Image (spheres, rainbow, N blue to C red):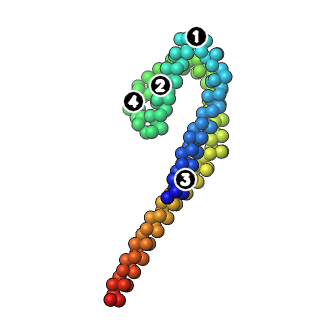
Amino acid sequence: MKKKANLKARLIVLQILSLIVSAAPLLIYVFINWNHYAKTPGDTIKISVGLVIAIILFLLKVIGKLKMPKRVVTYSTVVVLSYFLYPLIQDIVWLSLLCLAGEVADLLLLQRPIRKLKEDILIGKTADATTAQVKGEVKALFDEYMGGRT
C-alpha cells in the first residue's frame, strides 16, 4: 500500500514539474521584458486582467469543464484576450517559440517517466486484483477440500 502511495506522489510531483518546465521559458521571457510590456499602469492592469482570464480558461480546459458552444463565443474570447494581452501579442513569434521550447523540454525530460509511472500504477492495481482473486479461489478450494474430509 505504501508503494502505491509513493508512486502516486511521484506521479503528482512529475506532473507538476512537467507544467513548470513547459511554462518556464515563456514566464522567464515575460518577466525579463515586463517593463517593455507594462509601460503604463493601464497596460499593467490590461495584461493582468488578460492573464487572469487566460489562466481561468486554461484551467477550465485542463479539468474538462470548458465547452465552447459556438464559434461566436470562441472568437469573442479571442478578441477579448487579444485586447487585454496586446503588448504580449506583439512578441508572439518569440513567445510561441519559447512555448515550443518548453513543450520540447517537457517531452524529452518528463513525459516518458510520467507514462512509465502511470503504467507501474496500473500494473500494481492489476496485480493486486489478480492476487485477491487467486486468494479467493485458493480459499474456496481449500474450504471445499477441508469440508469434504470431515
Q: Of marks 3 and 2, which one's residue comes earlier in the chain? A: 3
Q: Amino acid at mark 3?
A: Leu
Q: Residue at x 44, y 34 (%)?
A: 60
Residue underneath mark 2: 53
Q: Amino acid at mark 1?
A: Thr
Q: Of marks 2 and 4, which one's residue comes earlier in the chain? A: 2
Q: Of marks 3 and 4, which one's residue comes earlier in the chain? A: 3
Q: Say which element carries label 1.
A: loop
Q: Say which element carries label 3.
A: helix
What is the CA distance from the residue labelled 2 to the residue labelled 4? Answer: 19 Å
Say if 38 sits above or below 25 in the image: above
Q: Quadrant of the C terminus?
A: bottom left
Residue 26 in picture, x, y percent from top left: 62, 29
Residue underneath mark 1: 40
Residue underneath mark 4: 70
Q: Nearer the viewer, mark 3 or mark 1?
A: 3
Q: Amino acid at mark 2?
A: Ile
Say if 48 sits above or below 11 in the image: above
What is the CA distance from the residue labelled 4 to the residue labelled 1? Answer: 35 Å
Q: Nearer the viewer, mark 3 or mark 2?
A: 3
